[in-house]
Amino acid sequence: MVRNVLVLATLWLAVPALAQESGRSLFNGKDLTGWEGNPASWSVQDGAITGVTKDDAPLPYNQFLIWRGGTVKNFELTAKVRQKGNNSGIQYRSK
């Protein structure tokens, strides 16, 4: 029984390490390399992708930040989102 628990614990601890080794981040934390978007709306601040709109200059249409750095097949989307009273969302795998 103890052996089975140790084997399961070892596998459980190994899974995140394997995912990190085989995966790659589409965002380098420094700039928008590989991404396409209006630089007036999108930037990197404190290591985070930041979208900004201004009350005195409302956008005439939606703004998008699109990954152009290569084809992505299977992926895991992880995001921390902070929204302050605005319309926002994440759209993926669309044409």
Image: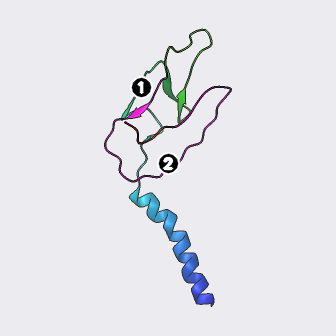
Residue 88 sits in quarter: top right
Residue ID at (51%, 63%): 16
Q: Are marks 1 and 2 in contact (CB under 8 Å)?
A: no
Residue 7 percent coordinates (x, y):
54, 82
Q: Which residues are magenta?
A: 63-90
Q: Inspect the image, locate mark 2, and give the three-letter code of the amino acid beneath it.
A: Leu
Q: Is residue 32 visible?
A: no
How busy is the neighbourhood of tag 2: few (under 14 within 10 Å), some, or many (20 plus)?
Answer: few
Q: Residue 2 lies in what quarter of the image? A: bottom right
Judging by the rendered image, the residue that carries numbered circle 2 is: 77
Q: Quadrant of residue 51?
A: top right
State the residue at coordinates (52%, 75%).
11
Task: Tell me where residue 80 appears, x and y as whole percent.
Answer: 59, 42
Q: Which residue extends farthest bottom? A: 1
Q: Position of residue 23 (x, y in %)?
A: 41, 55
Where 66 falls versus 15 (above or below)? above
- Residue, disc 1: 37
Q: Main secondary structure of the magenta part?
A: loop
Density class for disc 1 (Cα within 10 Å; few <14, some 14-19, many ≥20) is some
Q: Is residue 86 visible?
A: yes
Q: Amino acid at mark 1?
A: Gly
CA gap between label 1 and label 2 equals: 19 Å
Secondary structure beneath label 2: loop
